[in-house]
Image (spheres, rainbow, N blue to C red):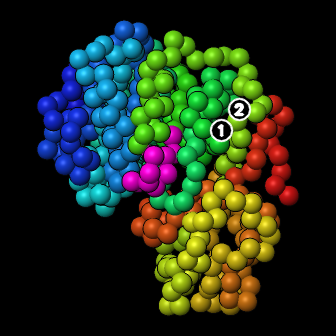
Amino acid sequence: MPRILDHLPDGFLDTPARELHRVLDGPTLIHLDGRRRPPLFASVLLHGNEDVGLVAIQRLLRDYAGRELPRALSIFVGNVAAAREGRRRLDGQPDFNRVWSEDVPDSPERRMAREVTERMQATGVFASVDVHNNTGINPHYGCINRLEPQFLHLAALFNRTAVYFIHPPQVQSMAFARFCPAITLECGKTGSPGSEAHAHEYLDACLNLAGIPDHPVAEHDLDLYHTVARVTVPDHLRIGFADPGADVSFLPELDHLNFRDLSAGTPIADLREATGPCPDVHDEHGRAVTGRYFECRDGRLYTRRPFLPAMLTRDTRIIRQDCLCYIMERYDWREGPVSSE
């Protein structure tokens, strides 16, 4: 179960993620009072190797040292143990951002997520902001799970680029979207210039909002994409980058393809076998759709149709623990999806 505090523990504002275990002995929910209520909720370190949210919160609270916060703030600090090792999650742990729905098997982490959700729902929470880095070359963007105006405004406040998704359904933002506007911030690679400052500015802006608009977002304020599929690599395949000994050897510049329009026939990887194997692709409803997006021929993996990838990474551990990438299409929230064909 999470530890519940109504104050900042000593040393919290000055301790880096890898040393935070010296301050917090595990997942912790911290409630801080402010001028307005209900509170803003911010979750950080759901992935232990993504410290942008922690750094942004520390900067924010140092800015308000000795002053009343403009709004109450509840901070959930997640995987402290994985942060100590600089890893997304420890071996044997579930992903802390995949335990937030009722279809998840019972575990201490699932019970933790349920308690945090129930406690925050009881506060009438103002909005939820889950802050992440990612491991590939991507722009900063906000992810939302509903196409309602308040969600879209939260996304536009962060950046013009935004992504709408409903899979995987076990993420924190999906759980909170049932009862408040919720967003996931993707703030580029860990340590990338400007990432902590951008997250800090966004959280400060949210704290100072008197309300979130419920009128439509202006057309020019948002470029919205829809995640339509998730790409994984079967566990039995050896993967690498420019590695002739790998079953699937991805191109070394793979993560430079994020948020780029890929045409049909774009090479993705070299294969040990002339006609395979291909990665696994499932759409947002869980259906296998590999053949819709990829084909294997002449010892290479190619795109079969145009699409935009996101979160392509060169980190093989992340590919194993999560996925190779997500496939997106442009989305007009007023008229529906725009086909990439």
In the displayed structure, does residue 323 sit left or right of residue 69?
Answer: right
Name the residue that disc number 2 marks.
221
Residue type (three-letter) at the residue carrying disc 1: Arg
Q: Is residue 112 above or below residue 84?
A: above
Q: So how many labels did they put on this image?
A: 2
- Quadrant holding the N terminus: top left
Q: Tell which circle, 2 or 1, labels the residue nearer the N-terminal end.
A: 1
| Residue plotted at (41% across, 43% down) | 196
Marks 2/1 in contact by CB < 8 Å: the verdict is yes
CA–CA distance between discs 2 and 1?
Answer: 6 Å
Q: Nearer the viewer, residue 318 or 171?
A: 318
> Is residue 121 at least partly visible in the picture?
no
Q: Nearer the viewer, residue 196 or 226?
A: 196
Q: Secondary structure at mark 1?
A: loop
Q: Secondary structure at mark 2?
A: helix
User: For the stretch drawn in magenta, what is the main secondary structure?
Assistant: loop
Neighbourhood count class around disc 1 (C-alpha, 10 Å): few under 14, some 14–19, many 20 upward: some
Name the residue that disc number 1 marks.
160
